Amino acid sequence: MIIEAGQLPDINQLLLTLQRQFSNYKVYTFGSKPHKSIIVQKSGIIGAQITLRNNEIMVDACSPNIFVSGILGALSAIFPPYINFEIKITDFLKSKYN
């Protein structure tokens, strides 16, 4: 899902905001410059990846575990737990930055 944002937050500020809002989940940075992402991990197989680009915040359901991600692949997009978690993160970011 893509959220249009008037002004994007700094990735470090967004990381802190997500850590406070979702304190019962693992929240950490992933990747490297120029497009570092944030992973919000609900469990070993359910998570969401947040990437900041231009004036957009992109939220994608993902599996934070590399092995599980390889097995699930495209199937993760159709299972309700992945979609529901992606929507939960997207709704929070929309209310905060849209």
Image (cartoon, rainbow, N blue to C red):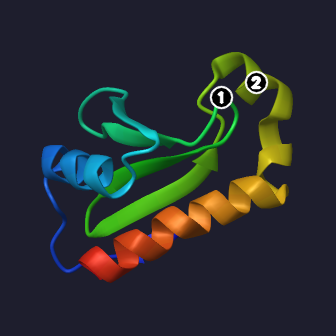
Quarter containing the C terminus: bottom left
Tell me the SS state at disc 1: loop
Residue type, numbered disc 2: Val
Residue in view at x 84 percent, y 55 percent = 79
Of residue 95 and residue 32, the one placed in the foreground of this image is 95
Q: Which mark identifies residue 44?
A: 1
In the picture shown, does residue 68 fall above or below 53?
A: above
Residue in view at x 71 percent, y 62 percent = 83
Q: Is disc 1 surrounded by few (<14), some (14 to 19) or many (20+) residues within 10 Å?
A: few
Residue in view at x 26 percent, y 69 percent = 55
Along the horizontal axis of the image, is 75 left or right of 85?
right
Label pair 1/2, CB-CB below 8 angstroms: yes
Along the horizontal axis of the image, is 13 left or right of 21?
left
Q: Earlier in the sequence, mark 1 or mark 2?
A: 1
Q: Which x, y percent locates residue 67?
A: 73, 17
Tell me the SS state at disc 2: helix
Q: Is disc 2 surrounded by few (<14), some (14 to 19) or many (20+) residues within 10 Å?
A: some
Residue type, numbered disc 1: Gly
Quarter containing the N terminus: bottom right
Q: Which mark identifies residue 79?
A: none
Residue named by callout 2: 68
In the picture shown, does residue 84 fall above or below 38?
A: below
